[in-house]
Image (cartoon, rainbow, N blue to C red):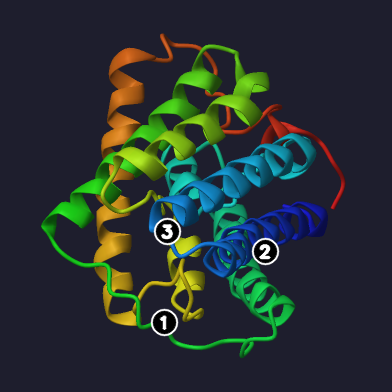
């Protein structure tokens, strides 16, 4: 684990949240049509995600997501200490990114959201969105196509924005961060824990789908990274 990798994870999470929240605020300012707001929010989010994966992937693996890091740790593709550091950096980055977005639009830096996102259907949407995300990442790394991550990971998230009832948070750090903006993309603090529970269920399903359809077949375990196996490198700390 290096400071450079942790910084990349924190920066990636921060800029991702700034894009999600900032574009949501801008969309609400530009249109009163919720469909247009969601579309603008989705386009900004997936564009930023693709750029962040491409630029920071060779440094940290571009997880930006505690669910992704946790699955990698369970598979022993990331050391426990590194995984813990990643998750702390991701949550801290998300918190800072939300504050940055709010400040850009002259809103309170952090403010509890009143946007309720609850119900069995919404939680099922989070399970589906997160399961698909982990499966896409697993399929990419198990088939040697990690270079397609900047295209296919945002493609899944963008699609799930529209077809899932939850609008595809699929990320515990994103969920925690969005509880601190009382804007279009916010989530009420009371709904955060159920969302994260649904995401962990989805991550488990996605990991199992990867094992079922893309087994290792006795090969050396490859890290869950995009696009290169940075966790196995000899980079000095």
**What label does residue 152 carry, if any?**
none
The vertical placement of 198 against 152, above or below, is below
Q: Is residue 66 visible?
A: no
Q: Quadrant of residue 85?
A: bottom right
> Is residue 17 depicted above or below 187 in this figure?
above
User: How many neighbours does mark 1 have within 10 angstroms: few (below 14), some (14-19), or many (20 or more)?
Assistant: some
The reply to whether the C-beta atoms of the residues labelled 2 and 3 are less than 8 Å apart is no
Instruction: Choose the circle earlier in sequence order: 1 or 2.
Output: 2
Task: Report x, y in % for residue 73.
Answer: 48, 45
Q: Callout 3: 10 Å neighbours few (<14), some, many (20+)?
A: few
Q: Which residue is mark 3?
A: 33
Measured in 3D between alpha carbons, the distance from the residue under mark 2 to the one under mark 3, in whole angstroms, is 27 Å
Is disc 2 placed on a helix, strand or loop? helix
Circle 3 — which element?
loop
**Whole-Å distance between the Cαs marked 3 and 1?**
20 Å
What residue sits right under mark 2 in the picture?
A: 14
Crowdedness near tag 2: few (<14), some (14–19) or many (≥20) residues, C-alpha within 10 Å = many
Which residue is pictured at 25% across the width and 47% down the height?
A: 125
Tell me the tag on residue 113.
1
């Amino acid at each position: 684990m290096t400071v450079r990798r942790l910084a990349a994870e924190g920066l990636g999470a921060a800029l991702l949240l700034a894009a999600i929240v900032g574009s949501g605020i801008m969309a609400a300012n530009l249109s009163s049509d919720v469909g247009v707001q969601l579309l603008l929010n989705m386009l900004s989010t997936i564009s930023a995600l693709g750029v962040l994966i491409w630029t920071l992937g060779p440094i940290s693996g571009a997880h930006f997501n505690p669910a992704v890091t946790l699955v990698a740790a369970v598979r022993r593709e990331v050391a426990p200490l590194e995984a813990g550091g990643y998750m702390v950096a991701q949550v801290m980055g998300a918190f800072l990114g939300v504050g940055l977005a709010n400040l850009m639009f002259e809103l309170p830096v952090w403010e509890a959201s009143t946007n309720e996102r609850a119900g069995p259907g919404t939680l099922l949407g989070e399970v589906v969105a997160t399961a698909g995300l982990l499966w896409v990442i697993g399929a990419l790394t198990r088939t040697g196509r990690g270079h397609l991550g900047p295209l296919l990971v945002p493609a899944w998230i963008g699609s799930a924005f529209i077809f899932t009832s939850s609008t595809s948070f699929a990320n515990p750090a994103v969920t925690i961060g969005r509880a601190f903006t009382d804007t279009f993309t916010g989530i009420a603090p009371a709904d955060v824990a159920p969302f994260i529970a649904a995401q962990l269920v989805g991550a488990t399903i996605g990991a199992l789908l990867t094992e079922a359809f893309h087994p290792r077949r006795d090969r050396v375990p490859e890290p869950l990274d995009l696009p290169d196996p940075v966790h196995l490198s000899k980079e000095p700390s």
